[in-house]
Amino acid sequence: MSSRKARRKDSLGFFSVLDDDELLELFVQFDWESLRACALVSRYFYLISHQEELWKELCLAAYVENKEANFSWKGTWRRTCLHRGKNYPSYSYERLSFPGLPAPRLEDKYQRATMPLEPLSSVRRTIDRRSNLSMEDFIREYETPNRPVILCNVTSSWKASTQWMTGHFLAKYGNVMFKTNGTTDDGHTFKMTFQEYVRYMRDNKDDKPLYLFDNKFMQRAPDMMEEYEVPFFFRDDLFDLMSDEDRPDYRWFLAGPARSGSPYHQDPHGTSAWNALLQGRKRWTLYPPHQIPPGVDPSLIDTEYYASPDVMKYYARVHPKLTQEPPFEDILEEGEIIFVPSGWWHQVLNLTDTIAITQNFCSPRNFQHVLRDLISKKNRSLWSDFRRSVQPRYPELFASAQPMIEAAMKMVHPPTESDSSSSDESDANDTSSSEEDDDAMMEKEVELIYTPDSSSGSLMLLVHARIDLFMRDNTILVRASSNYLMEDERKGTVHQSSSDVTRLGRWIPRIVQFSTAALQCKLRYCSHHITPSNSLWQLR
Ligand SMILES: O=C(O)CCC(=O)C(=O)O
Ligand SMILES: [Fe+2]
């Protein structure tokens, strides 16, 4: 065994059969007390249990109960989480590093969080950039042929162009809660005030920073609606004929620090979009609809909105090895607007702190793309609501799209012998669904137990953790629970915790291989009054 492997095994014990990604998926099951305790097991446990993404998950989950309003950023996700605990003694220490310890995945994450962005901050610009474009020219040269373009000198009359810089914006909207792209444990969007978000933007060390991404900003900050306007190129929007409740989400306020961004995706419902940048710089990469970008997993396109790696993962792993045709690429500068045509794949990396506003729309030019998408995605209520609202006003658009509508319908519902007709009316009324049978939980498949060796010192942390695996439909579910007892000055204290059933998958087969053995894991515990750097001398 190579010495690197041996060192890893020595520090991880039985857990060394799991690779770093698998360990992270396991550790994400723990509550904050377990995760904090794990740092004292060994050097490798320390490294894993200090991963910010684990603490980020815990933070987002914690603020469900706390109604999110009290969120206060403390410089790292770990500190933010721990310092909200009532009994946690607050002391600070330097985070340890173990240069000799091989932890390839964790090192990759660190590399993504720290790699300089300068080399990505200039690019051969391959998207047209136009000033003073007329509506006619925009339609003829870009919208009808479905080609991207960057528009200059459009936002200068907006209040937002001078007031939506973080400083100004903070003064006016600092106390407003905005939605982020984080999800809480109960499936809600994680929100925070702009003030806290700015503090987070300034000193986070994430490789995949939380992105402020709010489709309801106008409800909490209605003044913002007066501070920008839809550019005249994009005012034809057939979705405007639907009620606000019925139409799909279509406008977002976006703010994010360097390294945040949007992985490759195609915008929803076949719409086109415009994205106006009020502060900062964004690197855009686009591919036409038929060309699946490198890094996108074709097997996930139908089920995942982002079937692609995070933006920084893309730049660290995929970008250096690009062999296929280069994307259309450019850097959107402050005050510019990019037009993203229907169906185009696009990815965005924020190169600095950024503030932007974006809207999606359906005009007579991308109308057929939208229809095809609404029909093919089998979103029947949206399709029938759209048709009910738009057809009376634009009968000629529907008439000219009729052959396409019929062809798309046939693709979704190939006619069977018993079908005398396959009219779209019957499709719109079809309410059949494949609902999950929630009671179909099958029996437990495997139980893993690890217990400590009780001979390693007077201060002991006993950990008994249990991982239950379930099969439901074709998905493996995991439930982790742990209880432990600290024999220090808090003698007799028993903490119990259990995390929710979570959908996982990849690491299970590896565990199942040796599931028959009980896992023995030596834990040495030092009182939390001793800083980890003092205590770790005895750890492997
Ligand atoms: O991160 C960005 O600016 C791009 C956002 C985007 O593509 C979207 O909202 O669909
Ligand atoms: Fe998009």
Image (cartoon, grey):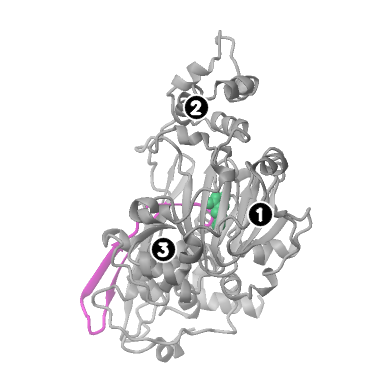
* Total count of labels: 3
What range is drawn magenta here? 478-507
Q: Amino acid at mark 2?
A: Val
Q: Is residue 413 above or below residue 266?
A: above
> Which of the two discs, 2 and 3, labels the residue nearer the N terminus?
3
> Which of the two discs, 2 and 1, labels the residue nearer the N terminus?
1
In the rendered image, which quarter is residue 81 located in? bottom left
The CA span between labels 2 and 3 is 42 Å
Q: Which label number is shown at residue 150?
A: 1
Considering the numbered disc 3 on the image, is that residue within a helix, a strand or a loop?
A: helix
Considering the numbered disc 1 on the image, is that residue within a helix, a strand or a loop?
A: strand
Q: Amino acid at mark 3?
A: Glu
In the rendered image, which quarter is residue 4 located in? bottom right
Visible residue check, residue 57: yes
Prevailing secondary structure of the magenta residues: strand
Q: Which residue is mark 2?
A: 390
Q: Which label number is shown at residue 57?
A: 3
